[in-house]
Amino acid sequence: MWIDAATIRDKLAMPALIAALAAADRSLFTVPERLHYPVGGGDLLSMPAYSPSVLGMKIVTVFPGNSRAGLPTVHATYQLFSARTGEILATIDGTELTRWRTAAVAVLAALNLFGASPGHILVVGTGALSSYLVSAFAESYPDAEIAVWGRRQEAGEAVARRARAARQAAVSVPDLETATRRADIICCATSSTAPLVLGSWVKDGAHLGLIGGFTPQMHETDSVAFRDALVVVDTPAAMVGAGELRAAVRDGYLRESELLTLSSLLSKNDRAGGRASRTIFKSIGSAENDLIAGEYLWRLVSSS
């Protein structure tokens, strides 16, 4: 079975996908170490995971320079297999699946870490993932104002126009510091190698999602952001691959022993906002979440 991008968009609904990610019994999953190869102007990653019902493998390339040519940064394919027989169940457009999964996981973390209803949400970055994040946050927090910031304001305006065309209110903002200081939830989806959102701008009680960087060279925020913060990661491998976490430990603002995983947070149903100056979710991409989303999608398509 081939599941293309159009089918994914037709079959998936963000609230239902978030619910599926929240409900999965993650204790049943095994996630081997991902393989990561720097190649040419980008990276090649292999991300396996398996459960008692299915096996999955994502092959993904990340080429940050693509944005200069108007191309998506991420390209991927996903293979889903039966855990009982090993037969291929589906080949899935991994690029589209990754966008849905990443946005859903970012919102899932915010729902569990931010204890109140946000008045203002800021999406930082205008790449292919940005519109998915705006949509996911708009559906989960329909009363919040959503702003988009990009290095090029015209790119932010394009994201906001697409959102408004889908009847989701969003505006483009020109000044990142002002927008950050106002925001209750900030979600960064960039491949920046220098901090964009400074910790001194993030107000007490806010939630900061960092979902773009996945290498030690990438930094979407600075070490100060981690001072007195509750920090949750999508995978323990983030401590090796996330530049922000490594810098915060080096600079004395974070201890590795203090990190929580998304799996442990969900298993405790722990809305931990309010116990720290702010909450931070750091994602480098988890094969576990790919597998949950891939199996959920395959079951939807198979039953239709």
Image (spheres, rainbow, N blue to C red):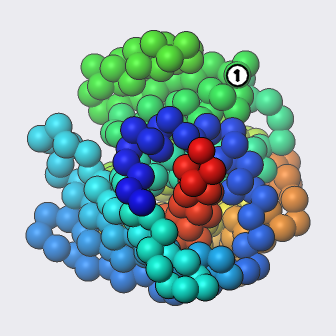
Say few, some or many: other residues with alpha carbon within 10 Å of mark 1 (under 14 / 14 to 19 / 20 or more). Answer: some
Q: Can residue 237 be seen in this view?
A: no
Residue of label 1: 142
Q: Looking at this view, is 108 or 8 the one in front?
A: 8
Left or right side of 192 for 298: right
Where's residue 151, x and y in %?
Answer: 30, 33
- Residue positioned 14% across, 64% down in the render: 41
Left or right side of 116 for 59: left
SS assignment at label 1: loop
- Residue positioned 36% across, 83% down in the render: 35
Quadrant in which the N terminus appears: bottom left
Vertical placement of residue 298 versus 80, above or below: above
Where's residue 55, x and y in %?
Answer: 54, 78
- Residue positioned 22% across, 58% down in the render: 63
Quadrant in which the C terminus appears: top right
Where's residue 104, x and y in %?
Answer: 60, 47
Where's residue 251, x and y in %?
Answer: 52, 71
Q: How many marks?
A: 1
Q: Looking at this view, is 57 or 175 the one in front?
A: 57
Left or right side of 283 for 165: left
Q: Looking at this view, is 304 or 128 the one in front?
A: 304
Q: Can residue 101 be seen in this view?
A: yes
- Residue positioned 73% across, 60% down in the render: 230
Left or right side of 197 for 53: right
Q: Which amino acid does label 1 sit on?
A: Pro
